[in-house]
Amino acid sequence: MKTRQMPASAGFDPAELQSALDDVHRAGVPGVFAEVRDDGRIWRGASGVADVGTGRPVRPDMRHRVGSVTKTFTAAAVMQQVEEGRIGLDAPIGDHLPELVPGERGRRITVRMLLDNTSGIPDYLPYAFPSLKGFPERPDVSTRSIDDNRFRAFRPAELIESGLSAPPVGEPGGPTGVYSNTNWLLLGELLARVTGVTAEEYITRNVIERAGLRHTAFPTGPHVEGPHARLYEAFYGLIDPPRDYSVYDMSWVGTAAALVSTMEDLNRFYALLLGGGIVSPSSLAEMQRTIPARALDGSPIRYGLGLHRVDLPGGTFWGHDGTVWGAGTMSLTSADGRRQMSVAVNLIRWNRPDTSGRPQPHPIDAAMKALYGRALCGGSSPAPETVP
């Protein structure tokens, strides 16, 4: 399904883009949809179903839980407050949130360290979802806590406390970042403290609305408002068949990963951000200062302040990706702003483990890699890493 057809050009062939989407669906993803932009031209496509029960087709304009893509929005909001002089990028977080990060830790961890994941604060997810802790090493891992928390309203402070109470994953300001959602909930609390409104309200007014995004919002309940696909979580074969988690209370990720958006809105957002329309050039330069970091799955990434840098044969790209239960998203924009890709899938963690418990390659991996290569570089390329 395409909403806009374009003539084929070097590296940008609508038929090949659609074929790459179809291959992802054939490899096992129920529904996949995307928007690709190239120097002012736009292609939108979709393949597969939004609902495996009814066969309702997926559409390119559907709203979607975009997971950790939210982090770029939160980072942009923080940088706006840095520009206003209300936040010091290298100021200790304890100056603003002494009750959440007290003592020596609060004095050593800076706002920048939260943004680039060098705070040493571990992720709270294993503690919010205890039945998942230890995957894949522990044989008794189950997905029970995913179901138990479907309608639970987490408070940011309790999740932050879980992360801070766990053993540190590094020294503050270390040379390598360790991806942690706890950092991003702290940044949400920081925004609330300095602006006097909730972080969600500030981000909505000053990032989402400033960018003119019409279909992007933080959820106010467990449902995705507007046309959307059901979201199927497989959790590495532990949920078979994959279960629909499109109805879910997103307080478990908040300002780290709760946003709902469309692929059109994501491309518009990153184009404006990288073009200087949301933060100043100096703030953008800070966001693009990357360090080596380790994703939640252990894979290496180059991470700035809420931005990934991805170097491909077609050039350097900036953006973010993310997953929440049942939903995966990747959004990347070339350094010159001419080429953009935003892709959504409604199945995630499809890889099944081998006898040692390690997730193994799946045909979906190769199909996704080919899609990214076609969309970004006009051919095959190494697939960007996915960060939960």
Image: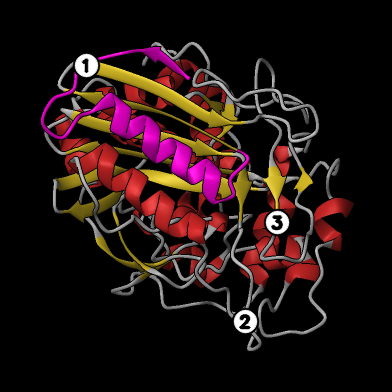
> Which mark is on residue 228?
none
Magenta segment boundaries in residue numbering: 1-30
Q: Residue drawn at (79%, 59%), measured in percent from left and top?
A: 240
Q: How is the image coloured?
A: secondary structure
Disc on res. 41: 1
**Residue 303 percent coordinates (x, y):** 31, 57
Q: Dividing the picture into quarters, in which one does residue 88 lie?
A: top left
User: For the point 63% across and 88% down, which residue is it?
Assistant: 356
Q: Position of residue 92 (x, y in %)?
A: 40, 57
Q: In the displayed structure, would residue 314 be above or below residue 59?
A: below
**Which amino acid does the dot numbered 3 rest on?**
Ala
Amino acid at the residue labelled 1: Arg
Q: Earlier in the sequence, mark 3 or mark 1?
A: 1
**Other residues around mark 1 within 10 Å, as few (<14) / some (14–19) / many (≥20):** some
**Which image quarter is the C terminus in?**
bottom right
- CA gap between label 2 and label 1 equals 43 Å
Q: CA distance from mark 2 to mark 3?
A: 15 Å
The three-letter amino acid code for the residue at tag 2 is Asp
Where 246 sits versus 355, above or below?
A: above
Residue 163 appears left or right of 27: right
The local secondary structure at tag 2 comes to loop
Residue position for label 3 = 234
Identify residue for label 2: 354
Secondary structure under badge 3?
loop
Cα distance in 3D space between marks 3 and 1: 35 Å
Question: Is residue 33 at least partly visible in the picture?
Answer: yes
Q: What percent of the width, then of the height, locates residue 267? A: 34, 26
Q: Residues within 10 Å of mark 2 (few under 14, many from 20)?
A: few
Q: Is residue 370 left or right of residue 376?
A: right
Residue in the picture at 44% in, 78% down: 170
Q: Nearer the viewer, residue 266 or 117?
A: 266
In this rendering, the answer to whether 53 lies above or below 28 is: above
